[in-house]
Image (cartoon, helix red, strand yellow):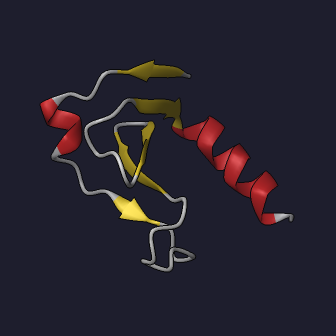
Amino acid sequence: MNVEEPKQAVSERAWFKSSYSTGSGGECVEVAACHGTVHVRDSKDKTGPILSVAAVGWAAFAEFAAQG
């Protein structure tokens, strides 16, 4: 896992916001998957830092989070 400064190539990827987002300005993240890596950013700060996680690590996190 690493945090990187935004790069033009990363910012042009297809970012997806959580289906739980209400659009009323609450806390939310966006994710973009590419080449075995999942990039995560703050949806309110699209030019801020991006967290990059190996796809297998993201899958484990998502599975754990889904357990409630």
Q: Residue furthest right?
A: 68
Q: Residue furthest front?
A: 25
Residue 57 spot, x, y in % from top left: 64, 36
Closer to the camera, 5 or 65?
5
Residue 66 in percent (x, y) is at: 77, 64
Q: From the viewer's perspective, is 7 left or right of 1?
A: left
Q: Where residue 55 sits in the image (x, y, percent)? A: 53, 39
Task: Pick the quarter of the image with the C terminus.
Answer: bottom right
Left or right placement of residue 10 versus residue 61 in this view: left
Image position of 51 with respect to 40: above or below: above
Would you identify the image quadrant in which residue 16 lies? bottom left
Q: Residue at x 42, y 65 (%)?
A: 17
Q: Nearer the viewer, residue 8 or 35?
A: 8
- Residue for point 23% across, 37% down: 10
- Quarter of the picture containing the N terminus is top right
- Residue 12 or 36: which is nearer the viewer? 12
Which residue is at a point 34% across and 37% down the rendered structure image?
35
Q: Is residue 63 left or right of residue 1?
A: right
**Residue at point 31%, 22% (across, down):** 5
Image position of 8 with respect to 44: above or below: above
Q: Which percent across, then down, holds residue 29?
A: 48, 54
Count the numbered circles shown: 0
**Residue 56, quarter of the rendered image:** top right
